[in-house]
Image (cartoon, grey):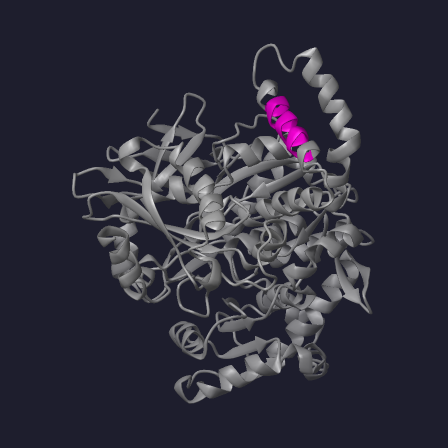
Amino acid sequence: MREFSLPALYEIPADGNLTDIVRRNAAQHPEVAVIARKADGVWQDVSARDFLAEVCSAAKGLIASGVQPGDRVGLMSRTRYEWTLLDFAIWSAGAVTVPVYETSSAEQIRWILGDSGATACVVESAGHTAAVESVREDLPALKNLWQIDAGGVAELERLGQDVSDAAVEERGSIAKADDTATIVYTSGTTGRPKGCVLTHRNFFAECGNVVERLRPLFRTDECSVLLFLPLAHVFGRLVQIAPMMAPIKLGCVPDIRSLTDELAAFRPTLILGVPRVFEKVYNAARARAQADGKGRIFDRAAGTAIAYSRALDSPSGPSLGLRIRHRVFDRLVYGKLRAVLGGRGEYAISGGAPLGERLGHFFRGIGFTVLEGYGLTESCAATAFNPWDRQKIGTVGQPLPGSVVRIADDGEVLLHGEHLFKEYWNNPAATAEVLADGWFHTGDLGTLDEDGYLRITGRKKEIIVTAGGKNVAPAVIEDRVRAHALVAECMVVGDGRPFVAALITLDEEFLGRWCAEHGKPAGSTAAALRDDPDLLAAVQTAVDDGNAAVSKAESVRKFRVLATQFTEESGHLTPSLKLKRNVVTRDYAAEIETLYTT
């Protein structure tokens, strides 16, 4: 199939904007908890009425400080209550939010705030303030800077004491559906980040149709979602806005290292995350079972869960014996795993990278279904996702209702719909390159099945052509290899070379546990173990699993374990954890050469 579409389920208000959401919630669901915040270590609910009042107070401060309609306001912080509060406050002041990753360097801050022409900025910490101040002389438009940790929100409330409610009402009503809501800068895997201009219409089309298609997951006063993704990433914004539209209760976690504790305390019914989160849940559970001498039981339980899930897709369903084994392991293993995820949830939505069929079947088999989706910043997050009632594991689902997915002759995925971005800020040439003939050209390769379910098979610009002329899509192998607990990152190489090879980094969190289980000295580093026969054998199992997904000509014949990590700080990963392939290729040229000369 070359093209598939679904009718829209949500009608976009032509004269509305995203501030309508908080006003409507306060009017229709005044006592419903729409968000929660941490105070003295305890989650406290905030009603729709109270949230609107706090949004208006912060908006008054922005107006009093001179923020004008259409002005860009930077927002640099970890995921926390104040991020969501300020996002809606910026819109209520008639302005445009410009997210900045809280890990951004001074140079990245200079580029984003400078390119967007931000007139004000709110940051989280003293470190962020210092970073902005270090480049402030290059930001002539920047007039105001507030710091959350230094009482920035309270300062805005104080500044706005003399601003009337009517003034906020007027400002908040200026923007219409086709006006800019935010400028989200892409990760910049191949160069400077581009600012994606996303309108209020884009978010209404995206979040409204997601909520309606997944309505059982968004039941008001029953469901809740815990947000731990960075809000500078468009997927994080989807997780913020969709619950507000439903409305259901939203909680924000700034430190993913505390995620397990927060899941237990908040007990969400829905989780939205990236594959690495679900991989770590599985790997950590398996490692704990092995440490307790129950590794064989866990592996049998995992195998049963996967078999049970696969059987659900067959006409006859699970056999009697499989159902019995599944019930036994549900008491012994699966219930404990669901408890780790909060104990109340039955569904999660995963995006950002492929989840993998094995992991998808495992989670559905334990009673926690992970619905995989696909999207880009330019598509305002999800442009396809699996419906809750018609999941096809291994695909990224059907198109967002109201949109179209087309497969071009060369296999590229093309998109059309009201969720697509308006333009790249200050970059008409780049805009024209990807928006041609009314279609957005994603750069990704994919296929559609007879029911309109999309599979992503690779990325056009990442296709490797070996010396023998074989085209290789590296993502297929990399995602499978990276699913192994020992592997942090995998980058396939081989362009113009006689065969395909790979650079692999180790997961430092899991490495210590592996050392203890295999009699290696405590505290052993990747540098010390990169040539260890036992470790190489373990990594080889991961490579073998990756190779099983491709033809022999596409398989990884040699790999090299690196002594260091690919990190954002080292310049090898983007803030959204995508590989900067050109930087890795340059910096590890000697390691790559070794793969082909030894």
Q: Residue at x 58, y 69 (%)?
A: 90
When asked about the image quadrant of residue 61, the answer is: bottom right
Residue at the image position 77 percent from the left and 36 percent from the top: 335
Is residue 308 inside the magenta stretch?
yes
State left or right for residue 436 relative to residue 519.
left
Region in magenta? 298-309
Q: Is residue 391 above or below residue 420?
A: above
Which residue sits at x=41%, y=24%? Answer: 449
Report the quarter where the N terminus lies: top left
Asked if the magenta segment contains residue 65, the reply would be no
Q: Nearer the viewer, residue 26 or 316?
A: 316
Residues 520 and 378: in front is 520
Q: Is residue 567 above or below residue 159?
A: above
Residue 550 visible within the image: yes
Left or right: 201 as drawn, with respect to 366: left
Left or right: residue 198 versus residue 16 is left
Camera-nearest residue between 131 and 144: 131
- Camera-side residue: 9 or 524? 524
Vertical side of 44 occupied by 121: above or below? below
